[in-house]
Amino acid sequence: MSNSSNLSPIRLDESGIFLNGRYRILLASSLFYFRIPKECWERRMHLLKAAGYNTIDVYFPWNYHETSPGIWNFTGQRDVTQFLSLAAKNDLFVIARPGPYICSEWDGGALPAWLWADNVPVRQDNPAFLAQIEHWYKQILPLIIPFQITRGGPVICMQIENELDFFDCKSPVSYMEKLMQQARALGIDIPLFYCCGQNDLLRGGGLTPDLYTAFNVYTSADNAGLEERALHLYHAARERQMPFLVTETNREHSFLKRLLVCGARLISPYNQTAGSTLDWYNGLTNWGTQESPLSLIASDYDFASMIGAAGEVNEEFYEARLLAGLILSLGESLAKSHPKASCDAILNSGSRVYPVPALDTGRGLLLVVSNLDGRAAFTLRMDGQSFPVEMPSLKTRLLPYRLRLSDKPSAALLTSSYEVGFIEESEAGVTVALYGEGPFYAQLQANGRTELLTAAPGTGIQTFRVGSVTVLVGSSKEIALAHIPGLPDLARPVEEQATPYPVSSVRYAVCDLPQAKPMPAPVQPMEKMGQYRGLGCYRFTLEKDSQILLQNVADFFTIEKNGQLLETGFSEGGCLERSLTAGSYAIYTEIWGHSNFDDVRRPSLQMGSLKGLSGLSRIEGYTALNENWEFDIDEQPIQEWYFFRHSNLSTLAPIDGYNRAVMPFHGVYDKWVELPADADCLFLHFGQANGIITVYVNGHREATVHPFDPYVDLSSYCGSARIELCLRITRRFYADYVGPVTLLWGRKIHTAIYETVPVEMLALPAESCQTGTFPLTLPSDRNIVLQLDLPSIPQSEMKLRLEGQNVKITAFHGTREIGRLLLGCPSMPTVAGGDPQIIHLCRNWLEGGDLRFWCQPMGPAPHICKAELTGYQSIAEN
């Protein structure tokens, strides 16, 4: 399959990726302009060039640019044109991924929250959703189009949608076809592709004509089945006459080598360049535990990435340079190579024998030797000989086997226990750099003779000369720090990039949250009142003591009475009952983020769930419904006979009282329920909600009960004298209880005073400011605003690390939110996706002043233990 002629600057076919006249291997890193301060964009590009990456992968988040319906922003930090211009300036290819859905642990996966507030069915072949996408495309695609490679720019291809096979799309092919039509109509003429998040080609986008298939390949680093899986995907792509494209994968370069040998032409480790989630755009996702799956995405968006949020790098930077050196050295022979599931070589670890996968480059083989079982020493057998190989656990080597180094002079590496870092030819001959740890040996054939080279490790770079062939042998670090042809030299080693600085004191004061203009409004989710991020407040008054049901509370909430703190907590989108006495109340709700992933295990994890409160109700009465349900075994599809079938011959049983030795146990329970005459709200509550419970009223299906929100709103039946309530329950065993079952009724609180809280306007009041040092104890019932006395440092970027207990901290520079931390809060959800104690700072933020921290108590004895500041000097720049 090809989307263009041979004269096009880009062609994708089963041989590989043809770019500007030759086939290439693309080594890509995600580089997200929306997570990296604008003044740092080019520094990150310099780092990637020094690491040997030739491509960047970038999402364009829809809700970052359309900040509210019809309000667009492409300036400053959101300046897409400047970002793409810098990519072009730095000779980096770009893979554009404008969504509409991006995932990326970003707020709502970048789908604007007002779509859910308006009940638009997202990620479906639906006219309402497609019309909204067209509005987005008409804004973003004209900014991408001038940078297409077909117009001399760096953008080589564009992704349509993202990981659709994780989502219940009813018609993925027609949906993809319509997105393609929109993109083509607006002027996108580069290849379009979709990625399969869990390798489900048919549900990820199907066999849509003229749409390329790419794959995300994640697994544990010790997975011995990776090669089998990757080769399966390689052949699936070739069956469609396409190259094997890996759009997301693990970040370790040993893992990437295994994909390379399986025929991958694009290798794009996800979030290889870390960043920070700013401007209230954190997401919620399902990275918690099996028991508590919901997790908060940290502001520090770093998954042990090669390049950290402050531009610091780890040891993988060396591995990147060495892999890039190999890719540059072998050029088109590597870009058009063919994988072999196994070759004549065998790897023996003492307890197991492994076949060795290989890559046929046309000028020799690269053997994949991986240490997956933790043993340090192996024996590699080939050509009737055995050679020792030593390497750390979870490392992979690409060992040359009969690899031709040069035709003139004639030279080849027959075997080697070390990998090829680079090959450089000159008039004087050929130089090959070999790197590794442990004993070194190689058989080199040059100028008609074969020599065995050996060296002891740890003695620095050693040089061998065989005829006109020069062999450099050293450790990974030594060769990576050397001059690698085609890559910039490094300014310093990894261990010299960081400098710690003391944080001596802090200024702080108790503060009240700022108030905006309040407005009477129905009690409804924040998004329905036009607020999609940040902090809101619902105010109401109770004339008498009341039992209050707070409906669908999310995310963080604070309840105050007459200005005094009563409770702070986190809710996963379920209902909460509270006994409140008469008085004036304020319920603050803060959106941490909308779920970026669709997961039914918690209400707030479901894509489309809303924030704040969906309602407030005074509960004035309860009716226990445990006893005397008409019962029958539920053994056939639901029929009309389930309803209105009351008979003196029916079995009457408690809701949890019928015993039957089957698994699973299906039952249907039915009864008439009398309703109060003066109620305008009505709820059914299940005390345990084990099993699958479907609620029917008067023969109509109302809801399936969620075990973590076991309230079913039946308020639409208020005014009826009675209803027929039917429960269809599937239990694993008869003893999986669902009761007690209770009917609640009362009166709604229809309106409240709502306000968007401009917490970014918090200031340190000079008249009540105090000075202290760490550890700093905070009041358990008041908000605190503080400023740190930070030193002046020469580095452009730094990280601030705060440690504490039971405190939530939000950092602001001016009116911009630059980081949210949740410190030592055992009652709160897991914080994942980065270090929950880190905030990335730029020097100009310090120089400009106005760096403030809002501290909110989240439990007993809140305090901040210490603050640590580290400055970083780029490894790629002096």
Image (cartoon, helix red, strand yellow):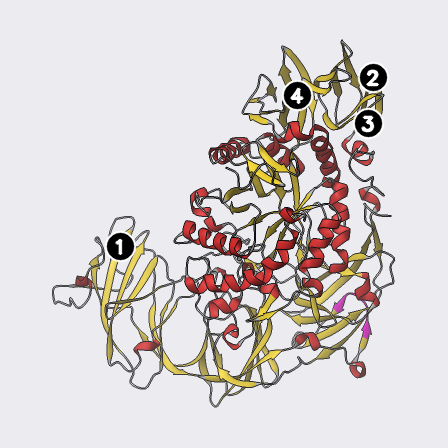
Q: Position of residue 319 (x, y in %)?
A: 72, 36
Q: Amino acid at mark 4?
A: Arg
Q: To which quarter of the image does residue 577 belong?
A: bottom left
Disc 4 is placed on an element classified as: loop
Q: CA distance from mark 3 to mark 2?
A: 26 Å
**Which residue is identified by label 3?**
458
Task: Check the image and report above or below for 6 versus 103.
Answer: above
Q: Is residue 7 left or right of residue 775?
A: left
At x 17%, y 68%, the residue is 644
At x 57%, y 22%, the residue is 351
Q: CA distance from mark 2 to mark 1?
A: 81 Å
At x 55%, y 71%, the residue is 69
Q: Earlier in the sequence, mark 2 or mark 1?
A: 2
**Which residue is identified by label 2?**
468
Q: Which residues are magenta?
A: 771-776
Q: Earlier in the sequence, mark 2 or mark 4?
A: 4
**Which residue is identified by label 4?**
363
Q: Is residue 437 left or right of residue 381?
A: right
Disc 1 is placed on an element classified as: strand
Of residues 654 and 501, the one nearer the viewer is 501
**Which residue is identified by label 1?**
666
At x 79%, y 65%, the residue is 845
Disc 3 and disc 2 in contact, CB within 8 angstroms:
no
Q: Position of residue 167 (x, y in %)?
A: 45, 53
The reply to whether residue 311 is in sight is no
Q: Position of residue 829 (x, y in %)?
A: 57, 60
Of residues 601 and 190, the one nearer the viewer is 190
